[in-house]
Image (spheres, helix red, strand yellow):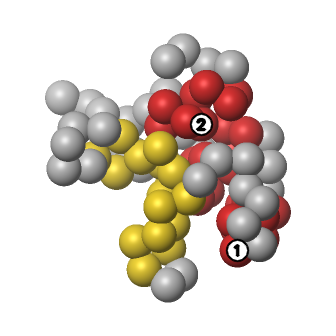
Amino acid sequence: MDTTEPNSPSGCPPIQGTTGSLFYSETEAAARLGLHRTTLRSLALAGRAPVEPIPLTEHRRVYRRADIHRLAGLET
């Protein structure tokens, strides 16, 4: 079963959470929101990102798929 998102900028599947919810990487989230990855990262570090990031490590964040789709006006 192919879980790769259509039009995914990286061609990689989104990260599968333990509860079955899906997350996008910073690059995928930025692409769907029409932002550059570094812009989204800068906004997240300043606490001003349009959606709340979920920190995985000090340097890696993911974003909830539902939040990104809601903000981008995509299906929920």
Q: Which residue is mark 1?
A: 45
Label 2 element class: helix
Residue most extreme to the top: 75
As measured in the structure, the alpha-carbon distance from the residue carrying label 1 to the one carrying label 2 is: 18 Å
- Asked if residue 37 can be seen in this view, the reply is yes
The mark found on residue 68 in the picture is 2
- Asked if residue 38 can be seen in this view, the reply is no
Q: Residue at x 73, y 39 (%)?
A: 33
Q: Residue at x 72, y 66 (%)?
A: 47
Name which residue type carries label 2: Ile
Which image quadrant is residue 19 in?
top left
- Position of 3 with respect to 14 (left or right) is left
Along the line of sight, the residue nearer the viewer: 57 or 13? 57
Along the line of sight, the residue nearer the viewer: 23 or 49? 49
The mark found on residue 32 in the picture is none
Packing grade of label 2 (10 A; few <14, some 14-19, many >=20) is: many
Residue 30 at x, y percent in the picture: 69, 50
Which image quadrant is residue 72 in?
top right
**Quarter holding the N terminus?**
top left
Label 1 element class: helix
Q: Is residue 69 above or below residue 21?
A: above
Residue 57 at x, y percent in the picture: 42, 80
Residue 40 at x, y percent in the picture: 74, 59
